[in-house]
């Protein structure tokens, strides 16, 4: 028998401003300890899907009007973003969103705000984050605003890790980064998945990179899943090759 998925999205619709239907019945699953890629072009609805899970649509006048979202077997559509983080699911937003006027270490520590355990446990986890991101240790006293794009992406993932998540919703980690750095970030994602058992739902336009690291992928077009399958099958699919991998 296979394990129940850690995250299950059932046929959700999302509407912005009461009229703009952006997600038109999206369903997807993330298995426990899986890495799943959510792929698609600019505007396909990837960020909206992640924000629907995190309950971050309200500030953008968006709402889930149909369908359901389950995390660890329980409905979560009505949970606040903070309560979802406390249950173990956290989003790393597109564009990194570090606090520029705080140091790297202060940024990381803000990630522990939902935790009820003491300073010693938080310090242990800070050291653990530094083992995955040695660059952040080197830069820990620098203001985040003065670090590179790659370091800010690492800082954003490190900060998410400080909440001790079982699942990270990672939005477009490759955005604006050189290929070498993108590979470095994805290697760390794989390591976190491997060693810490963190599940990932990764929204990406960089299909090639995402399908190298994910085990399963969904392709969104215009608010609908048009194709899904094992990463290898998607990499070999003629349409994916032509439209998303730039080879035919
Ligand atoms: P990108 O890679 O550019 O982030 P995406 O696949 O993540 O693209 P979304 O950001 O989810 O796509 O956007 C999906 C659609 O919803 C787009 O047509 C976008 O213009 C629209 N949209 C996003 N946010 C809002 C909003 N706050 N109000 C109205 N429409 C929105």
Image (cartoon, grey):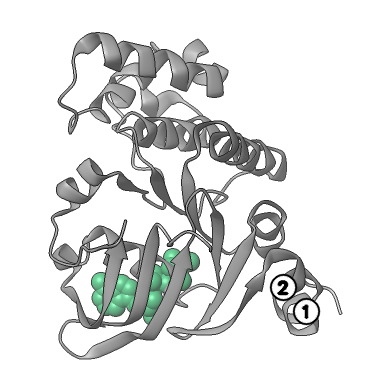
Q: Which mark is residue 234?
A: 2
Query: Is 24 situated above or below 233?
Result: below
Q: Quadrant of residue 182?
A: top right
Q: Secondary structure at mark 2?
A: helix
Q: Which residue is labeled 1 in the image?
A: 237
Quadrant where the image shows the C terminus: bottom right
In the drawing, does residue 111 fall left or right of residue 243? Answer: left
**Residue sitting nearer the eye, 72 or 162:** 72
Q: Identify which residue is drawn at 28% across, 19% down.
A: 106
The answer to whether residue 207 is left or right of residue 237 is left
Q: Is residue 133 visible?
A: no
**Mark 1 and mark 2 residues within 8 Å of each other at the beta carbon:** yes
| Label 2: how many Cα within 10 Å (few below 14, some 14–19, many 20+) | many
Q: Residue at x 72, y 73 (%)?
A: 234
Residue 237 occupies quadrant: bottom right
- Say which element carries label 1: loop
How many labels were placed on the picture?
Answer: 2
Would you identify the image quadrant in which residue 43 lies? Answer: bottom left
Q: At x 27% / y 31%, what residue is drawn?
A: 111
Of residues 4 and 84, the one nearer the viewer is 4
Q: Position of residue 172 (x, y in %)?
A: 50, 55
- Judged from the image, the quadrant occupied by ligand 1 is bottom left
Task: Provide residue 77's location: percent of width, then percent of height.
Answer: 19, 67
CA neighbours of label 1 inside 10 A, class few (<14), some (14 to 19), many (20+): some
């Amino acid at each position: 028998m296979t394990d129940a998925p850690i995250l299950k999205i059932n046929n959700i619709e999302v509407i912005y401003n009461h009229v703009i239907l952006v997600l038109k019945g999206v369903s997807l699953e993330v298995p426990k300890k899986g890495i799943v890629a959510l792929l698609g072009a600019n505007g396909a609805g990837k960020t909206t899907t992640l924000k629907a899970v995190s309950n971050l649509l309200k500030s953008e006048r968006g709402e889930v009007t149909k369908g359901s979202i389950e995390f660890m077997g329980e409905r979560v559509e009505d949970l606040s973003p903070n309560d979802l983080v406390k249950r173990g699911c956290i989003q790393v937003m597109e564009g990194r969103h570090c606090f520029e006027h705080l140091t790297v270490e202060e940024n990381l520590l803000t990630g522990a705000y939902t935790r009820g355990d003491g300073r010693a446990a938080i310090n242990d986890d800070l050291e653990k984050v530094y083992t995955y991101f040695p660059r952040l240790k080197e830069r820990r006293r620098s203001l985040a605003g003065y670090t590179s794009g790659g370091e800010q992406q690492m800082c954003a993932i490190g900060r998410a890790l400080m909440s001790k998540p079982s699942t990270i919703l990672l939005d477009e980690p490759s955005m604006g980064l050189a290929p070498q750095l993108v590979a470095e970030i994805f290697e760390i994602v794989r390591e976190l998945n491997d060693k810490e058992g963190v599940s990932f739902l990764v929204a990406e336009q960089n299909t090639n990179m995402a399908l190298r690291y994910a085990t399963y992928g969904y392709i969104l077009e215009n608010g609908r899943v048009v194709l899904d399958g094992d990463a290898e099958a998607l990499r070999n699919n003629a349409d994916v090759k032509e439209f998303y991998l730039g080879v035919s």
